[in-house]
Image: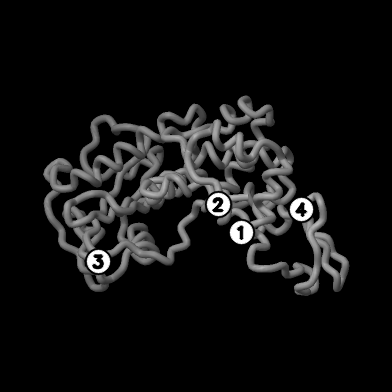
């Protein structure tokens, strides 16, 4: 079975027509470098007809979904693959209600699985932004009436965004973090996690960035109503528009997952043919998480 490439749903269904085909796909890449028993670390065994591996040493039998984010999926693996396909290839945001109805799955089960997909979409933080980087903050939820500048209204979800640009000012990569306020303390994590100290960074004149100049090469210029940060503000507009297409309310405690999903797709816009496969591999390599763990982390 060859690696799937593309973003055509009909071709996708043709190549992975049922649960067994999806199990075979997982098994191929899970054990492509050889089998290693998760119980005894033994390396000798054989694959059974249902794509489970039998260890000769301890006789443990391991499925292709074991020890992955597909572990104990409550619906068929093909439906799980389809949800990943839609989340990675769709230009619009998707709700658990939509996908649940489409694939005959309960909204709750769909929502929990989508959170697992978003878990795989989190940044590894191994590849910080370099070269030219523009940074700014924004709010989600519309304009605040009668207020000027940065508002501390707790009803608004606040975020900071960092955009890496090419020499021709084209967007290369994006990272977004939810923040509590506009203090230097809240602004610092996106720099520490996603921006290299060698980067040439531009921000507006907000005083919260001043202390960061000790560590980062920051130049502060007037925003001029966003005209000096055109590409950055286009991305901010896209984020807000994308979030507005979600039929259900996105709470403050959940919004970081949606920021991660948006950035994940933007950062892989040049590799659309392989984004589904690469996401499957990330989910395969990630340790399983339970519904209780997801609930605890998000609430």
Which picture quadrant has residue 61?
Answer: bottom right
Disc 4, disc 1: CB below 8 Å?
no
Mark positioned earlier in the residue sequence (3 or 1): 3
Q: Which residue is mark 3?
A: 199
Mark 1 — residue?
A: 286
Q: Secondary structure beneath disc 4?
A: loop
Q: Are marks 2 and 1 in contact (CB under 8 Å)?
A: yes
Q: Which residue is mark 2?
A: 119
Residue bearing the label numbered 4: 51
Measure the C-alpha gap from mark 4 to mark 2: 25 Å
Residue displayed at 81% across by 51% down: 49
Q: Residue at x 28, y 64 (%)?
A: 130
Secondary structure under the numbered disc 3 in the rendered image: loop
The residues bearing labels 3 and 1 have C-alpha atoms spaced at a distance of 30 Å
Q: CB atoms at circles 4 and 3 under 8 Å apart?
A: no
Q: Position of residue 296 (x, y in %)?
A: 63, 51
Q: Earlier in the sequence, mark 4 or mark 1?
A: 4
**Residue 256 visible in the snapshot:** no
Earlier in the chain: of badge 4 and badge 2, it is: 4
* Foreground of the two, 126 or 219: 126
Q: Along the polypeptide, which appears first: circle 3 or circle 2? A: 2
The label nearer to you, 3 versus 1, is 1
* Mark closer to the observer (2, 1): 1
């Amino acid at each position: 079975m060859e690696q799937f490439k593309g973003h055509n749903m009909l071709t996708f269904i043709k190549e992975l027509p049922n649960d067994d085909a999806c199990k075979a796909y997982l098994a191929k890449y899970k054990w492509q470098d050889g089998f290693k028993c998760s119980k005894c670390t033994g390396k000798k065994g054989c694959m059974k007809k249902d794509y489970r591996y039998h260890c000769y040493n301890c006789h443990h039998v391991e499925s292709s979904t074991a020890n992955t984010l597909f572990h104990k999926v409550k619906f068929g693996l093909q439906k799980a693959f389809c949800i990943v396909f839609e989340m990675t290839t769709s230009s619009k945001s998707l709700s658990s209600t939509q996908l649940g109805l489409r694939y005959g799955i309960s909204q709750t089960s769909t929502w929990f699985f989508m959170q697992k997909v978003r878990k795989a979409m989190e940044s590894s933080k191994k590849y910080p932004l370099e070269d030219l980087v523009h940074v700014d903050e924004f709010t989600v939820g519309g304009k605040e009436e009668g207020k000027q500048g940065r508002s501390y209204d707790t009803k608004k979800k606040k975020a900071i965004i960092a955009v890496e640009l090419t020499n021709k000012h084209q967007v290369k990569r994006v990272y977004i973090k939810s923040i509590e306020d506009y203090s230097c303390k809240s602004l610092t994590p996106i720099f520490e996690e996603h921006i290299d100290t060698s980067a040439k960074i531009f921000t507006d004149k907000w005083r919260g960035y001043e202390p960061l100049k000790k560590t980062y090469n920051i130049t502060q210029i007037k925003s001029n109503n966003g005209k000096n940060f055109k590409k950055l503000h286009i991305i901010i507009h896209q984020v807000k528009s994308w979030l507005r297409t979600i039929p259900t309310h996105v709470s403050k405690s959940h919004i970081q997952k949606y920021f991660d999903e948006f950035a994940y797709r933007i950062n892989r816009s040049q590799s659309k043919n392989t984004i589904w496969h690469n996401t499957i591999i990330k989910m395969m390599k990630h340790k399983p998480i339970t519904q209780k763990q997801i609930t605890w982390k998000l609430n």
